[in-house]
Image: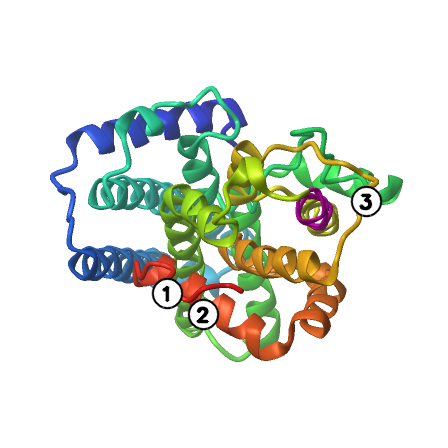
Amino acid sequence: MLSKSILKNWAVKRLLENFSSSKEVYIENKKEADRRLDLLCRMAIIRAGVVGLLSGLVVIFFALLLRDFEFGGQNQKLIFAVVLALIGFLTTGIELAFLYRDSLNTASRMAKVINLPQEEIAKMDVEHAIGPWLIYAALGAPGYRGILFGIDPLEKIGRLGLLIRKILKKLGSASSFTFFKAILRRIWVRIIGRVATRAYVELLALPIFILFNIVGMRHTMSEMRSRLVGHELTPKLIQHAFPEGLESINSGVRRATLEGLIERVTTARYLHPNQIRVLELLGDTYDKNAKISKTDRRRSDRFLVALSAMSGKDSRRCKKLNKAIIERLGKEEVGMVRKEVQDAIHDLIPFERKWN
């Protein structure tokens, strides 16, 4: 299994090389840029499905090639099982390497289309820079779990949760995915293995692995787009939500906004890149004794809904927080704000409706 540092160094090198060599160009027209981003994402998803298909076909080919061993003596059966397991692990490893590499390549091309400065991509030593976050998105990491801006995302997790997290952290993404496929194959064999050859079992499992790749890549592309567009969209969101300017935001709005953001981070147990971007621009200090009026709360809630929509899929743990905001702000208004954010990310439509 590749160590975290080796994998990260490879990803950093890959991302920078792809960005420098990419033939994509900045597209100023928003509609054309949106269409190009959509195409890049769709092609990545299609490639993920194809590589899942090819990976499965390789295993099926060897299962057919060695079918005489499958029904031979005890030693032959053992050889068959070992060889096929090794082939399964090898093909899955190659498959994962391709998916990670393709994700980073697509991210680089998307960055060129929206004209993200190369110096921003090159900031690899800063944990809250866009470069590492694109790498983490490719690896399936939801967000940052370390202490940042004085906020500890794992503040509410408890001792048992920390222990479980430490155990899971020892398992790399690649090994977890490989073992998942191996276990799924084993379950499949248990279910129908007594009435079918291994090649037939693999053939039946093939659509599941293809679908798994497609769904996984679709989520990765959505998250990468959110992080890429969100890097430039976050300042615009703050300006739209607080047109009076950051220095002129009253103490009640600032307190409600930052306390609400901290509560969401500690509930979700991670800091999303777009939340980090907000803290960079908005700051993390506020008056804990400031009075919060109904108007302050509504302004804060609207901003937090928008930021949540930009910060990946909500954790189930945030259900109570979302319900409280809907009760205060109204279901219709929450829906409108979320749609405006999704339009801004996926259709590059600017914020226009006034949030009064």
Magenta span: 251-260
The amino acid type of the residue labelled 3 equals Ile
Which residue is at the far right?
159
- Quadrant of residue 193 within the rendered picture: bottom right
- What residue type is disc 1 on? Asp
Q: Residue furthest top?
A: 125
Colour scheme of the picture: rainbow
Quadrant in which residue 300 is drawn = bottom right
| Residue wearing tag 3 | 157
Packing grade of label 2 (10 A; few <14, some 14-19, many >=20) is some
CA–CA distance in space, label 3 to label 1: 34 Å
Q: Earlier in the sequence, mark 3 or mark 1?
A: 3
Please name the residue shown 74% across and 51% down the image.
Answer: 267
Q: Kindly identify the amino acid type of the residue bearing the numbered disc 2.
A: Lys
**Position in image of residue 138 (x %, y %):** 42, 44
Q: How far across and how far down the image is residue 301, in percent? A: 64, 60
Task: Give the label on residue 177, or none.
Answer: none
Query: What SS does tag 1 mark?
Result: helix
- Residue drawn where x is 57% and y is 56% of the image: 303
Q: From the image, tell me which residue sits under label 2.
A: 339
